[in-house]
Amino acid sequence: MLAGRGVIFVTLTVLLVQSRGYLAASAGGPRSETLLMTTTRFSGEVKVPHHGTTISFQVELKEWQLDSNEQSLKLPIKGFYIAHALVGAVHTQIAGKSETHLAGDFWTVESGTSMLVSIKTPQQAAILETLGVTPAR
């Protein structure tokens, strides 16, 4: 009876991993083998009062789990966003500027700018959170 439960557990785990959206990401040049697991925590329209009118924004809160691969990957986010390192240390390149961000750090990425992210070995993984904000259509 326990063997049957093990098969069910493994099957459910595989289905959950596939449904959470593993992406093979590429940062230009040679193809990156870095895997990125993404979880959307919130996605919706937010309306903000402004001088007697209302301005609408599309807001998306995502969590990105990265593995320890030395190749950089480009987060597929469009528009302005705030990034937050939840776990681990990441190396970023934004508009040609390289920085290291530790757990607890916040930074922004302007609309039209991309961010390359990498984790240097021997660190195992890192988790980022992004809050993307774009004008609603």
Image: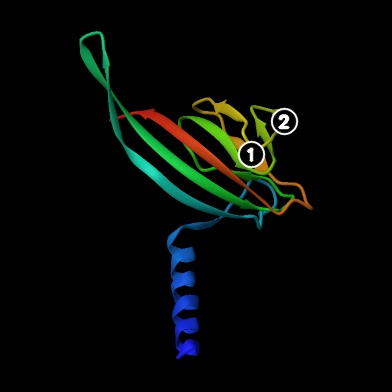
Q: Give the quadrant of the C terminus.
A: top left
Give the residue type at disc 2: Ser
Amino acid carrying label 1: it is Leu
At 49% from the left edge and 30% from the top edge, which residue is drawn? 81
Picture coordinates of residue 60 (x, y %)? 40, 38
- x 60%, y 35%: residue: 115
Is the residue 78 above or below the residue 135 in the image?
Answer: below
x then y, percent, for residue 13: 48, 70
Identify the residue at the far front of this view: 2
Task: Count residues near mark 2 (Cα–Cα under 10 Å), then give few for <14, some for 14-19, many for 20+.
Answer: few
Q: Position of residue 35 (x, y in %)?
A: 60, 56
Left or right, residue 51 beside residue 123 = left
Residue at the image position 45 percent from the left and 88 percent from the top = 4
Q: Secondary structure at mark 2?
A: strand
Instruction: Specify the farthest residue to the left.
Output: 52
* Outermost top residue: 51
Which one is nearer the viewer's eye here, 71 or 55? 55
* Residue 98 circle label: 2
Of helix, strand and loop, which one carries label 1? strand
Percent position (x, y) of residue 135? Answer: 34, 26
| 96 relative to 109 in the view: left or right | right
Q: CA distance from mark 1 to mark 2?
A: 9 Å
Please tell me the numbered disc located at residue 89. none
Of mark 1 and mark 2, the one earlier in the sequence is 2
Q: Quadrant of the N terminus?
A: bottom left
Q: Is residue 23 above or below residue 74?
A: below
Q: Quadrant of residue 97?
A: top right
- What residue is disc 1 on? 116
